[in-house]
């Protein structure tokens, strides 16, 4: 019961973060929301007994990808303005 | 055995109260810097207490938990410090009740020193 | 107006399809043929405690080689494009210096992060994790150090040599399995050892260590070339 509740909550927050990532006007919020999607998805994987996938998602999806996006955002900001 | 369990449970409860207070502080505080400070301080202590409590309930995990506590003790303050510094450098306003702002003072001092240095170099030529 | 209508129509059609799938879904109660073979024979044939590692490195080792190649190609392309873009501009941007606290903490934390990454990929056959995860952790350590010291320049040549050497050793270990064992990347080149200890499961720890080094070097290469274009304007 409590497992189902937790899984549903995590799924709802993943969807909310994904919607924020799509509809927000500021790029930096979109990037952070993408990182949040990965974070919640990794917790969900952990709950569903897939620790290997969870570790990959947390390290690459929510850590490195966000960082690389931020680097690139900083670069294009300089050129745009 | 029994006493350890009860102590662990109490420590975990206190830790979660601290984390709750941190969340409340993030909601109530007036500006970014105060929010960062509340969130970090309360959640660092709360996480440490919670982890210690779990370590008392499961004594076999205590080594790993000690490493985790050390890691949190290093990373949490550093990350909050860097966040607050970056916020100050992109000129996020402080609350109107601010009394002292040492970082701005030191920045102004640095700028004045640089100006003075430039003028001296001009005078030399 | 039409566009919005189209969007809603698409959403409804998709919802109908997925509702049908959801109603008919009941999780598989029994393992299928391949999975039950792995579950039954994995421990005795490969000797790895973590069955995922056994599948990734040994049974499906060829796919892992493909994944590593994809990562290598991505890193090479990023390096190529950034290099051609950064040429000709030698003016160094005025980056904000990090504070004393950040620099000191990066010096303390980077070795710890490297250690965690190495732990994850050396223990790939015992605990969750493995080469890719460990490599990503190492690369995030490098990224952290570069954030603390934005004017530092990384020696790309060392990283490239490390990466290609690890890739070569990975392929050579696979060929050794072809010669001495039963096929490409067969892990019975070395003795299987005692089940559940660090030196067990044949060459799996070795292979995963080299994959970890390769992935870590590649991702660090990507990050440091991104940092390079930040420095130059």
Image (cartoon, rainbow, N blue to C red):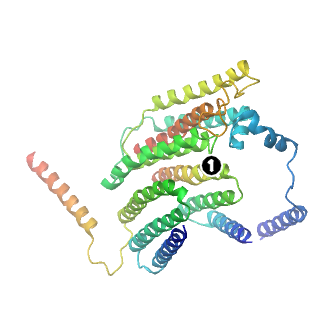
Against B17, residue C42 (above or below) is above
Q: Position of residue A40 (x, y in %)?
A: 63, 62
Direction from residue A76 to residue C3 in the image, left or right:
right
Q: Quadrant of the C terminus of chain B?
A: top left
Direction from residue B98 to residue B37 in the image, left or right:
right
Q: Position of residue C135 (x, y in %)?
A: 56, 41
Name the residue rendered at 85%, 49% in the picture: C31
Secondary structure at badge 1 equals helix
Name the residue rendered at 71%, 68% in the picture: A3
Q: Which quadrant of the figure has residue B73?
A: bottom left
Q: Chain of mark 1?
A: A
Q: Counting other residues with Cα less than 10 Å from the Cα at mark 1, is it few (<14), some (14-19), or many (20 or more)?
A: many
Residue in front for this viewpoint, C81 or A29: A29
Residue in front for this viewpoint, B94 or B78: B78
Name the residue rendered at 80%, 40% in the picture: C38
Q: Position of residue C86 (x, y in %)?
A: 46, 38
Name the residue rendered at 40%, 38% in the picture: C89
Q: Position of residue C93 (x, y in %)?
A: 36, 47
Against C169, residue B64 (above or below) is below
Q: Which residue is mark 1?
A: A56
Against C196, residue B22 (above or below) is below
């Amino acid at each position: 019961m409590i497992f189902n509740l937790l899984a549903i909550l995590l799924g709802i927050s993943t969807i909310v973060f994904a919607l924020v990532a799509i509809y927000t006007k500021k790029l930096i919020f979109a990037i952070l929301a993408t990182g949040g999607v990965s974070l919640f998805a990794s917790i969900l994987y952990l709950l569903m007994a897939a620790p290997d996938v969870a570790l990959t998602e947390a390290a690459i999806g929510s850590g490195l990808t966000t960082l690389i996006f931020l680097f690139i955002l900083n670069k294009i900001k300089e050129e745009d303005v | 055995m029994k006493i350890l369990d009860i102590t662990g449970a109490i420590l975990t409860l206190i830790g979660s109260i601290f984390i709750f207070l941190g969340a409340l502080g993030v909601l109530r505080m007036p500006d970014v810097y105060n929010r960062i400070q509340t969130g970090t301080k309360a959640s660092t202590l709360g996480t440490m207490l919670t982890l210690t409590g779990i370590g008392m309930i499961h004594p076999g995990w205590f080594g790993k938990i000690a490493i985790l506590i050390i890691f949190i003790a290093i990373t949490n303050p550093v990350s909050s410090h860097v966040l607050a510094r970056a916020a100050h450098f992109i000129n996020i306003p402080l609350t109107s009740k601010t009394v002292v702002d040492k970082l701005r003072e030191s920045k102004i001092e640095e700028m004045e020193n640089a100006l003075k240095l430039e003028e001296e170099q001009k005078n030399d030529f | 107006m039409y566009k919005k209508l189209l969007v809603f129509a698409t959403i409804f059609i998709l919802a109908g399809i997925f509702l049908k799938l959801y109603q008919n879904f009941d999780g598989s109660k029994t393992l299928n043929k391949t999975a039950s073979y792995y579950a039954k024979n994995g421990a005795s044939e490969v000797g790895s405690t973590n069955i995922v590692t056994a599948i990734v490195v040994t049974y499906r080792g060829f796919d892992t080689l493909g994944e590593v190649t994809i990562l290598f190609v991505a890193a090479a392309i990023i390096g190529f494009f950034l290099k051609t873009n950064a040429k000709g501009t030698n003016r160094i941007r005025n980056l904000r210096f990090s504070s004393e606290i950040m620099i000191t903490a990066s010096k303390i934390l980077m070795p710890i992060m490297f250690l965690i990454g190495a732990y994850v990929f050396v223990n790939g056959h015992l605990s969750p994790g493995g080469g890719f995860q460990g490599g990503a952790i190492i690369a995030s350590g490098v990224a952290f150090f570069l954030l603390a010291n934005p004017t530092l320049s990384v020696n790309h040549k060392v990283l490239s040599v490390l990466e290609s050497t690890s890739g070569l050793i990975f392929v050579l270990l696979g060929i050794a399995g072809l010669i001495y064992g039963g096929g490409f990347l067969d892990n019975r080149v070395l003795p299987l050892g005692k089940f559940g200890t660090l030196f067990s499961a044949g060459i799996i720890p070795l292979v995963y260590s080299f994959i970890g080094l390769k992935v870590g070097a590649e991702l660090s290469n990507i990050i440091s070339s991104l940092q390079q274009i930040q420095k130059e304007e």
